[in-house]
Amino acid sequence: MIALLDYGAGNLTSVRKAFAALGAELQTPAAPADLSSVSAIIVPGVGHFDATCALDGHWRETIRARLREGVPVLGICLGLQWLFDGSSEAPDARGLGVFPGTCVKLVAPKVPHVGWNSLSLIHESPLTADIPDGAQVYFTHSYAAPVVDATVAVANHGQAFSAIVERDNVAAVQFHPEKSAEVGLKILRNWLGVHALQTHHRLP
């Protein structure tokens, strides 16, 4: 089972539809204990970083434990930011700290950053297999994560920021793959194929 976390900040319906198009069914755990048997975890999210406080100590401890066991985790949009140390949007809300650094507000003439933008690939990754440099994906956010060693692709909106990060069994995207047409579906397909083989889904 692939778990799709619902902490009150995610666009769960569109994420489910995208994965369903790839033959993968997602289920939403009601409690941290439900993560004990999942084969992969997806952390979606849109909106204010403070919403991540709903992922309290029990959720955090369980997710960390599953990470140590090698369970794949995918963060989407706010889910990517939560995997960093935190965000200046909500200084008292801690991120999971898988990736170092603090997310900050974009410095650009127009914020939030809403719409299509190009990916600049800076490291090879199975997640971006067959994705061309400059591919267009759909963003909607005001805060962004710094470029770090684990950054696979960057985008630019007034400043360069991490668009895709990946290390070991943890991957995350700042954009919305479920709204990014064929490129987004390809990235999700790559994640299913490389990071979530335990799901035993037959991929198209």
Image (spheres, rainbow, N blue to C red):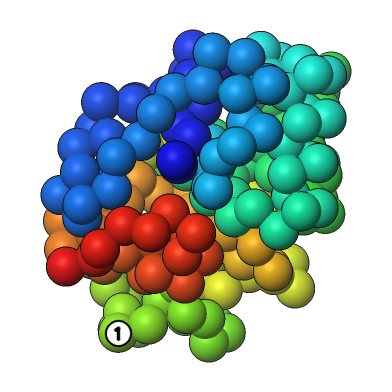
Q: Is residue 142 above or below residue 12?
A: below
In this rendered view, identify the residue nearer to me: 16 or 150: 16
Residue name at image x 83 percent, y 30 percent: 61
Q: Is residue 1 above or below residue 180?
A: above
- 44 left or right, relative to 115: right
The residue beneath circle 1 is 130
Picture quadrant of residue 152: bottom right
In this rendered view, identify the residue nearer to me: 133 or 82: 82
x and y percent of residue 50 in the render? 66, 16
Residue name at image x 54 percent, y 48 percent: 39
Picture quadrant of residue 117: bottom left
- Which of the image's four quarters has the C terminus? bottom left
Total count of labels = 1
Which residue type does callout 1 highlight?
A: Asp
x and y percent of residue 66 in the render? 73, 44
x and y percent of residue 8 in the render? 49, 12
Q: Is residue 161 above or below residue 190?
A: above
x and y percent of residue 160 in the render? 56, 63
Determine the secondary structure under disc 1.
loop
Q: Is residue 44 in view from this perspective?
A: no
- 6 left or right, relative to 13: right
Q: Is residue 169 in view from this perspective?
A: yes
In this rendered view, identify the residue nearer to me: 162 or 105: 162
Residue name at image x 45 percent, y 32 percent: 4
In this rendered view, identify the residue nearer to me: 95 or 109: 95
- Which of the image's four quarters has the N terminus? top left
Crowd class of label 1 (few under 14; some 14 to 19; many from 20; radius 10 Å): few
- 101 left or right, relative to 144: right
